[in-house]
Amino acid sequence: MNFKGTLPTLILEALEHQPSHGYRIAQRIKDRSEGILDFKEGTLYPALHKLEREGLVSSSEATENGRARRYYRITDSGAAALARDRAEWRVLSRAVTTILGEA
């Protein structure tokens, strides 16, 4: 996994404990990264749609405060992919930290 490919993993993580709509997913990522990762609609929704096509998330419409929203939910396949991505990220992160720590 490279840094550029982390958005799908971050989306899956945001959905791990509860379904959510796109704006809330983006806010969760932004809040948890202390404002460093701020994905806009033009980046977030294509990634959500790709995850849905791949069967890693599913979606359904619901009304919230009188407004129709599309809620996304992680699937069993998505949870398995998230577990693999986490393990891969730990290995990659340790390697980069080791290299940069030597500089």
Image (spheres, grey):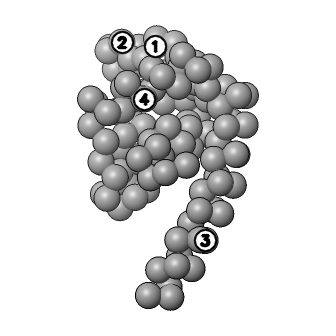
Q: If you read the primary sequence from the N terminus, does the residue marked by circle 3 or circle 1 appear first?
A: 1
Cα–Cα gap, marks 4 and 3:
26 Å
Is disc 4 surrounded by few (<14), some (14 to 19) or many (20+) residues within 10 Å? some
Hey, what amino acid is under mark 3? Arg
37, above or below 93, in the image: above
Residue under the point 70% across and 45% down: 83
Q: If you read the primary sequence from the N terminus, does the residue marked by circle 1 or circle 4 appear first?
A: 4
Q: If you read the primary sequence from the N terminus, does the residue marked by circle 1 or circle 2 appear first?
A: 1
Residue under the point 37% across and 24% down: 46
What is the x, y in percent for residue 97? 53, 76
5, above or below 77, in the image: below
Instruction: Mark 1 and mark 2 in contact? Answer it, CB < 8 Å.
Output: yes
Q: Which residue is mark 1?
A: 62
Residue under the point 56% across and 66% down: 93
- Callout 1 secondary element: strand
Is disc 3 surrounded by few (<14), some (14 to 19) or many (20+) residues within 10 Å? few
Q: Which residue is mark 4?
A: 47
Front-most of residues 75 and 67: 75
- Residue extending farthest to the bottom is 102
Cα–Cα gap, marks 3 and 2:
43 Å
Q: Which residue is mark 2?
A: 68
Cα–Cα gap, marks 4 and 2:
20 Å
Is disc 1 surrounded by few (<14), some (14 to 19) or many (20+) residues within 10 Å? few
What is the x, y in percent for residue 60? 51, 13
Front-most of residues 3 and 59: 3
Cα–Cα gap, marks 3 and 1:
41 Å
Q: If you read the primary sequence from the N terminus, does the residue marked by circle 3 or circle 2 appear first?
A: 2
Q: Which residue is mark 3?
A: 94
